[in-house]
Image (cartoon, rainbow, N blue to C red):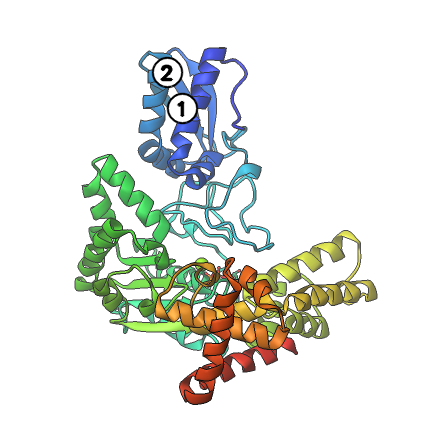
């Protein structure tokens, strides 16, 4: 599971593994990513010899993991130990081999990570977790290193689905006092929220290379906060987030739901930064008002600037995105193939890119071009695969995106009004369009009883007739379903 040197005694080896496992339990995903950039060379003369890919990794691991790791190891070996660090950009044997690294937000995307397997971790606070992969320099860290070099404004295609979010993000990166603070970017997964955040960072750093941009996922903020409390390092934590911060970019803020202590801390962080005029950008898969288990005072802070959404892009935007991606990845892509593919994949940009990369890989492995007849057949297969999905899953997805709820919400037992209504609408549409049986639908919606589905369908049917607002919702969803069936 972990790579360990040969020359350890078996007790040392066992203890080392146990200590690693113990340390890992606290934050498996982050652990794997950091320890993919740390090697262990053995224990010599009372010293645990560690190698880090760069100073940044060394310092992070030193503060965040080493106290626990060394405590455990000393306890198990029953002797005091020291640590000897070296730095070597060409790390021979990382403790967690890169292939084992797990992305904390491991996405269903099949886009290969932009990070080469030998590069340092892509997770954690200064090097935030990002499912799309963040390329890091292997030399001593530079502020830019934590941001995906491909996630720039230049590489972001603007269409009606994202123009407000794009314009607001661009303005926010424009220097001086941002026009809207905070900027809250909301929208479904894979629609470019993280990309926009990185783009802001790139632009700010291009103008002010020393700007202290704190970019972190809400999940990591939470973990760091918990660690700070446990290790009595709150002063350090607050300095990082409140005083030594020129811009705060907090990704996936929905993760704070229900985490009261972290919410409280974040509330004060927010106020301190906001009062000082420091730009704050937040992203979320829901609108602030739809964030559940989020205190009102935070929701009202989130909405106090500008809330801008990103929607699924239309066909022209999808074609433009494919062309841009092909250009970045040096994939020869003709207009007709771009259009063909864009017509087939419409759920989100990540999937669209994934399909392109997969096809391009297949084409190059088989020595064909994407225009080749055989490849056209492959594209048609992508089509059938995705068209087969137009059905229950598609209806659920469109309903989720329309009402800004997640699929997990639909499946959950949550009876919150907005979630319950979205669920009922999805049941109604599935019944109408797919003619599925009530028990079948019950199973597809988090194993509910068929009578629940029956009453949901009946309720929406009757609401539709007498409530124009409900009818308008349904029509909007039906339009979207129709356009995705093309
Ligand atoms: P989110 O954070 O909303 O889940 P990401 O920002 O990770 O989504 O985007 C997923 C992928 O789609 C990334 O590779 C990103 O570069 C790409 N992408 C999304 N929107 C656009 C766009 N408008 N133009 C170009 N690429 C985009
Ligand atoms: Mg994201």
Marker count (numbered): 2
Say which residue appears at 46% left-offset and 40% top-offset.
33
SS at badge 2: helix
Q: Are marks 1 and 2 in contact (CB under 8 Å)?
A: yes
Crowding near the residue tagged with mark 1, few <14, some 14–19, many ≥20 C-alpha atoms within 10 Å? many
Give me the residue at 46% from left, 22% from top: 17
Residue 419 image point, x, y percent? 40, 67
Residue 109's quadrant in the figure?
A: bottom right
| Res 350 seen here | yes
Q: Return the residue at label 1.
A: 19
Q: Nearer the viewer, residue 370 or 345?
A: 345
Which quarter of the rendering shows the N terminus?
Answer: top right
146 and 81: which one is in front? 81
Say which label, 1 or 2, has the lower sequence index: 1
Left or right of 95, for residue 374: right
Up-down relation of residue 384 to residue 132 (above or below): below
């Amino acid at each position: 599971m972990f790579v360990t040197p040969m020359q350890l005694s078996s007790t040392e080896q066992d203890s080392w593994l146990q200590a690693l496992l113990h340390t890992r339990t606290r934050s498996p995903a982050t652990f794997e990513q950091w320890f993919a950039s740390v090697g262990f060379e053995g224990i010599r003369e009372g010293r645990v010899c560690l190698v880090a890919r760069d100073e940044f990794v060394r310092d992070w691991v030193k503060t965040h993991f080493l106290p626990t790791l060394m405590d455990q190891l000393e306890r198990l070996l029953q002797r005091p130990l020291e640590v000897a660090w070296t730095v070597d950009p060409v790390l021979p044997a990382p403790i967690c081999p890169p292939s084992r690294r797990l992305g904390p937000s491991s996405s269903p995307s099949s886009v290969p990570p932009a990070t080469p397997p030998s590069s340092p971790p892509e997770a954690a606070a200064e090097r935030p977790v990002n499912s799309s992969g963040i390329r890091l320099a292997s030399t001593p860290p530079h502020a830019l290193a934590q941001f995906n070099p491909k996630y720039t404004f230049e590489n972001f295609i603007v269409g009606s689905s994202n123009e407000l979010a794009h314009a607001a993000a661009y303005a926010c990166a424009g220097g001086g006092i941002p026009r809207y603070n905070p900027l809250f970017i909301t929208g479904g997964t894979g629609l470019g929220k993280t990309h926009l955040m990185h783009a802001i960072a790139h632009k700010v750093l291009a103008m002010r290379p020393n700007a202290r941009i704190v970019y972190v996922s809400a999940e990591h903020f939470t973990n760091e906060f918990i660690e700070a409390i446990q290790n009595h390092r709150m002063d350090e934590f607050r300095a990082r987030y409140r005083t030594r911060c020129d811009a705060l970019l907090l990704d996936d803020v929905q993760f704070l739901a229900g985490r009261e202590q972290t919410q409280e801390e974040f509330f004060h962080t927010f106020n301190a930064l906001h009062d000082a005029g420091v730009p704050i950008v937040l992203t979320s898969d829901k609108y602030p008002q739809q964030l559940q288990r989020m205190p009102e005072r935070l929701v009202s802070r989130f909405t106090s600037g500008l809330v801008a959404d990103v929607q699924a892009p239309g066909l022209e935007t999808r074609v433009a995105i494919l062309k841009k991606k092909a250009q970045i990845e040096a994939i020869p892509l003709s207009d007709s193939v771009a259009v063909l593919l864009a017509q087939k994949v419409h759920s989100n940009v990540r999937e669209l890119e994934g399909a392109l990369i997969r096809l391009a890989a297949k084409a190059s492995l088989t020595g064909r071009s994407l225009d080749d007849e055989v490849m056209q057949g492959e594209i048609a297969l992508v089509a059938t695969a995705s068209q087969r999905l137009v059905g229950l899953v598609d209806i659920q997805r469109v309903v989720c995106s329309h009402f800004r709820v997640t699929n997990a919400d639909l499946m959950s037992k949550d009876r919150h009004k907005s979630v319950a209504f979205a669920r009922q609408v999805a049941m109604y549409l599935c019944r109408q369009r797919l003619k599925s049986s009530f028990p079948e639908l019950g199973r597809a919606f988090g194993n509910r009883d068929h009578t629940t589905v029956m009453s949901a369908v009946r309720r929406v049917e009757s609401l539709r007739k007498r409530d124009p607002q409900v009818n308008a919702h349904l029509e909007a969803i039906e339009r979207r379903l129709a356009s995705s069936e093309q």
